[in-house]
Amino acid sequence: MSITSANPLDRVSLKHQPILDPGFLPAVVWNRAYRSLAEETSDSRTMDLALERPDGTAFRWSSVLLPDLPEHSEATLKYVERTLKFLLWQKGGSRVKIAGAPEVVEQLKAQYAKGGAREFDWDFIGTKIFGEPISISAVDAADLPEANDSVMPLGRHLDGCRIGFDLGGSDRKCAAVIDGEVVFSEEVVWDPYFQSDPQYHIDGVHDSLKRAAAHLPRVDAIGGSSAGVYVNNEVRAASLFRGVSEEDFEGHIRGIFGTLKERWDGVPFEVVNDGEVTALAGSMSLEENSVLGVAMGTSEAAGYVDPDGHIRPWLNELAFAPVDYRDDGPLDEWSTDEGCGVQFFSQQGVARLAPLAGFDFGDMPFPKQLVEVQEAMKAGDDRARKIYQTIGTCFGYAIAHYADFYEVGSLLILGRVTSGEGGNVIIEEAERVLADEFPELSIRLVVPDEKTKRHGQAVAAASLPSSKG
């Protein structure tokens, strides 16, 4: 497929066209076209960016940019803004400092502000997660902070008697683990989403911990996971607690795991996003590091294990990370942004493609639409196959895009969208794209085995804290 426009950067060629989504413009292809042109253009410049958090954690990124000329301004803004958006949701931070491109800073400040195109990100990542609105400023290169990602790595501590738990929207999973072996596990049904009393949540988690502790001679450490954003063991944003008032959230839920730690005599206690624990479980099972996990379910969840075998204090909320750079890409109603991962790699993505494939599900809820497509796939319906082929093609390009930001050896694929034969089609198409378009990448696509699915998450969660505290 050839994409042409007045902008020469849009003249990119795709070897694989998503069968139901021919307008898809992969972020990785567009970005590489921009950098290639910048490297070939005289008077190009280097931009250095730092993304900071209030606690001093800092991340760095740099890139060649086209010269500061009117004919390049639109492309350069798109390149920098889309990359910044990715970094905000991958790494997380509220203070953006840029050296080498002052004109871009002013444009970004207008977008990441109240009333701007990125107001959602400005407020959600800034105020809700890090306690202050996102700020963007131009500085001299000498004034940029050094990279500082020195938070203690978590995971792979298997010694002693431990409890691992995972909090879901319909059940609480909890396990007792002794020296890495599960001696007890159970799922307890609960209904957290619309419970306004914070005590419901505190007592519910505490009850699961007590049930697991009854099968241990002692408790040396407790580790847990849940969907949402957790920073330094604090709840910053999580749908589980959506029914709790803002006042009660600040007074009781933000520090819920500190409260529980006190109930358990201050034993080492760590809680992180469930995507991180899934990636850690996969890494432990595969006995490999540099593992990126992507779950295609209600949304797109992700987690990452670094080359040293640890999870890092990153957000990895790839549902909001852009993967499609066309100007009229699919819209995410929540963030009001276009082309983000959730519209491609989730049950929302399936529902978006279903009418393009010829299905008419009307107002059927997304989970039921996914079931219908899965049943059609079992029956050999070519319409369903085209949905999975489209997801797989887009995913192949997205994986290459992720590889520009993560060091990836293996990519763990899971989630309801990838179950059954449709999941095999997604993997086959993604592997075809990677082989044909990005032969320099050596990334293995892996589906977790049954043992990892059953007990891996609990063991990985339990392994989060060091028993030495």
Image (spheres, rainbow, N blue to C red):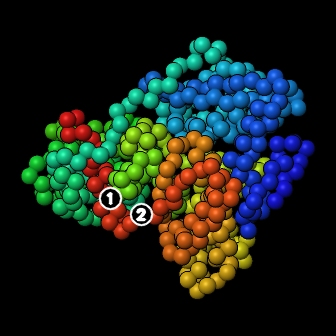
* Residue occupying the point 75% across, 53% down: 25
* Quarter occupied by residue 115: top right
Q: Position of residue 353 (x, y in %)?
A: 68, 68
Q: Which residue is painted at 64% across and 35% down in the image?
A: 84
Q: Nearer the viewer, residue 301 or 452?
A: 452
Q: Seen in the image, is 185 located left or right of residue 311?
A: left
Counting other residues with Cα less than 10 Å from the Cα at mark 2, is it few (<14), some (14-19), or many (20 or more)?
some
Residue with the most extreme right position: 6
- Give residue 9's mark: none
Q: Residue at x 53, y 19 (%)?
A: 145
Amino acid at pointer 1: Gly
Identity of the residue furthest to the bottom in this view: 379
Q: Nearer the viewer, residue 247 or 203?
A: 203
Quadrant of the image occupied by residue 143 = top right
Q: Is residue 27 visible?
A: yes
Which amino acid lies under the numbered mark 2 shown in the image of this protein?
Pro
Q: Which residue is mark 1?
A: 456
Q: Position of residue 156 (x, y in %)?
A: 29, 46
Whole-number angstrom distance, CA of label 2 to CA of label 1: 9 Å
Marks 2,1: beta carbons within 8 A: yes
Residue 333 lies, with reference to residue 81, above or below; the image says below
Q: Which residue bears the numbered disc 2?
A: 448
Badge 2 element:
loop
Q: Name the quadrant of the C terminus.
A: top left
The image quadrant where one finds the N terminus is bottom right
